Image (tube, rainbow, N blue to C red):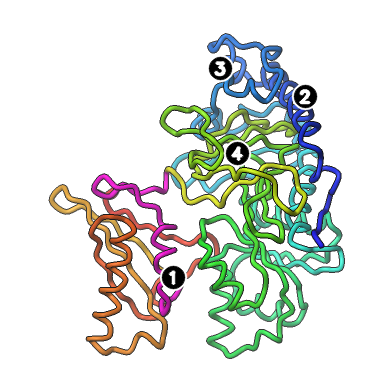
Amino acid sequence: MYHYYNPEAETMPVTQLKELQAKRLHDTVKRVYDHVPMYRKKFNEAGLKPDDIRSVDDLEKLPFTVKQDLRDNYPFGLFAVPMEEIVRIHASSGTTGKQTVVGYTKNDIRIWGEVMARTLGAGGVTKKDIGHISYGYGLFTGGLGGHIGSETIGCATIPASTGNTVRQITILQDFKPTFLLCTPSYALTIAEYLEDNKIPLESLNLKFGFFGAEPWSESMRAEIETRLNLKAYDIYGLSEIIGPGVGYECEDQCGLHIAEDHFILEIIDPNTGKQVPDGQRGEIVFTCITKEALPLIRYRTRDIGCKIPGLCSCGRTCVRMAKPSGRTDDMLIIRGVNVFPSQIESVLMDLGGIAPHYQLVVERENSLDRLTVLVELTEENFTGEVRRLEEINKKIRSAIESTLGIAVTVKLVSPKSIQRFEGKAVRVVDKRKAK
């Protein structure tokens, strides 16, 4: 039996959904043209008027929005409503420039609660469940996004936030939450603490986990499900669009369902800007068609993914997207080869005997790029026997080089020596940027 939070919306006939999208798209384009100077300027430069946009097929006529547009209009220049209608402000970390600022009206918050309730409901959560939210609260959208979805369903909700793993374990044991929201890397940190302190999984009551905010492989999913004895669901979102809840897995775990009555998905060739066929990888682009405060048009996310052809057996009629394989701005170019951290993660997890913690270090020596992969071994494999370690190193290096097609250096490190992070894991250290 499949679970839905809003079956009427989630199983809407495709024809009806397209008609709804067309109306909402036209209304949104008119709203931003009338109220956001940047969009009025972009549309005028393209020779476009709102009445030129009548269907989803007209999307390609519209100009793209990129992150720099948000920074150029910092902090509130892209808001489409007056400040007295804004009830919430979030922002990105701003680690690579000015932070991107996101505003919400009351109705935007309601929509966010709705799509996050669908996210949790698709995994089987009902109002009888108890939620443990271990994403960060604050300007980051993860914590409050998960929280509002849980409360919208009607669950008892624990705002644990990040950090203090000892206290988190105590809450998991004593309050008996049934579902967990955090990054996949932090889920493994929790599992590691349980194992190190010989705390039995039976002392917890977790059934589901909803993990996102960083790329993670199917191998890592299997690792989390085994070590925490729960079903692990992928969730997708970004603050500029609304936060978590843009895409979510159902119980079949065969792609991320997109809340298409609120967000229109495109996959484009990042070089040409043209849409690519279903099943072909490209850059993920979203258009918001119900948001009031910050309705972005054709926002280039820099995430890499593809649409999955056909409908899901769960009965949801919205389009599905494959789990993003990385980001164009996280992609490393090593001696002319495109490298995504997720590729290396998949190789390492499939080999076995390796802890799910690794780091990529990129350096440049004499104008030549060099990639070193730090690999953390498990206790049983970190024996200290030189021949055994040499065999493991060779096996890992051969597997990575076969996948990437370039030479790499593998450095085996002792258990628990790679830094753990309560939020997003730092997988890449690019020392070329420091020179």
Where residue 350 is drawn, which disc sits there? Answer: 1
Q: Residue 350 in magenta? A: yes
Q: How far apart are marks 4 and 3 (CA)?
A: 20 Å
Rendered location of residue 419, percent (x, y): 43, 70
| Callout 4–callout 3 Cβ contact below 8 Å | no
Q: What element carries label 3?
A: helix
How far apart are labels 2 and 3 at the CA level? 21 Å
Q: Is residue 51 above or below residue 264?
A: above
Judge depth for marks 2 and 1 and give the one in front. Answer: 1
Give the residue drawn at x 46%, y 33%: 269
**Disc 2 marks which residue?**
23
Magenta span: 329-356
Compared to residue 351, the image places residue 431 above or below, namely: above
Mark carried by residue 101: 4
Along the viewing direction, whichever of 180 and 55 lies nearer the viewer: 55
Q: What residue type is labelled 2?
A: Lys
Q: Disc 4 vs disc 3: which is toward the camera?
A: 3
Q: Earlier in the sequence, mark 4 or mark 3?
A: 3
